[in-house]
Image: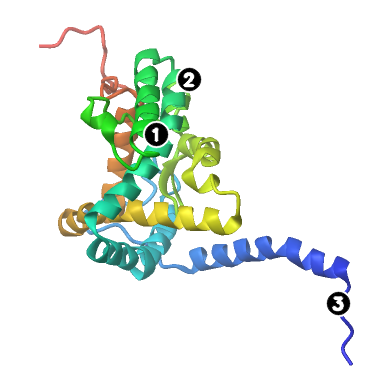
Amino acid sequence: MTLPTPAPRRLARCRWLPRSLAAALFIVIAGCASAPPAPGMPPMGTNPADPWEAFNRKIFAFNDALDEAILKPVATAWRDNVPELVRRGVDNVLGNIGDLWSAANHLLQGKLQTGTEMTIRFVTNTVFGFGGLLDIATEARLPRRSEDFGQTLGRWGVGPGPYVVLPLYGPRTVRDTFGLAADWPFEPARLPSTEGGRFAVGAMAVINTRTNLLSASDLLNQVALDRYTFLRDAYLQKRLDAVYDGAPPMETFEDEDPDKPKK
């Protein structure tokens, strides 16, 4: 006769379960074949913005495999089988939830006008757009200007730090990784009161985001010689433009004297 496991031992096993899953995930990532640079590309680790390129490429390969096996097929099925009106409604609701946190980040950056406009946009779509199901604010010339806490940190002088690829989340910088931790409590998946509801909303947000990127990813596969390098450079440039609202400072070089008149 087998005696039941004492309650304290069962609790101990539960506490160790997340650590075991994290260790298993790390082993999977470490075992993935990294995506090597394409012929003619600079060797790994030579880009000063990406000193962890060797490890980043392993995580990139893991994310890529997961996307090809699960995310892309699900997103394609969602696009091909769900009516556009429903997909647009889901996209509008998720975007409207994000608009409130964007408004807060505008205000945290001292952008009072755009922060006020984003607040009005959120209230308009929430009240008159049935919780954001309809995007009335855009028609009223209140466009979406998304901001996150990583941009807020950059606005106040925090440097981007090294480029890093996170499991599941993809490209980031060290600054944006810290910003992600601040953004997380305001994600749509945090709204439901039950674990099942949070999982459903989070999954829907991931599917919606991946669906919106289907055309871009297909084009990337056609034109990019080295997908890792292309995505890294595009991400870093996009974030630089986002922090400076599309007007980043001019790049200077060490051997260039700014006081020397140009010929």
Q: Nearer the viewer, residue 205 or 147?
A: 205
User: Residue tagged by mark 3?
Assistant: 5
Q: Nearer the viewer, residue 38 or 31?
A: 31
Pinpoint residue 194: horizontal percent, then vertical percent: 60, 54
Q: Secondary structure at mark 1?
A: helix
- Give the label, 1 or 3, closer to the camera: 1
Pinpoint residue 214: horizontal percent, then vertical percent: 24, 56
User: Residue tagged by mark 1?
Assistant: 126
Residue 200 in view in this figure: yes
Q: Which is nearer the N-term, disc 1 or disc 3?
A: 3
Pinpoint residue 62: horizontal percent, then vertical percent: 42, 63
Which image quarter holds the C terminus?
Answer: top left
The amino acid type found where label 3 is placed reads Thr
Q: Which is nearer the N-term, disc 3 or disc 2?
A: 3
How far apart marks 1 and 3 lie (CA) works out to 51 Å
What mark, if any, has residue 108 been given in the picture?
2
Which image quarter holds the N terminus?
Answer: bottom right
Q: Which is nearer the N-term, disc 1 or disc 2?
A: 2
Residue at image coords 27%, 62%: 82
Check the image and report above or below for 70 versus 186.
Answer: below
The colour scheme is rainbow
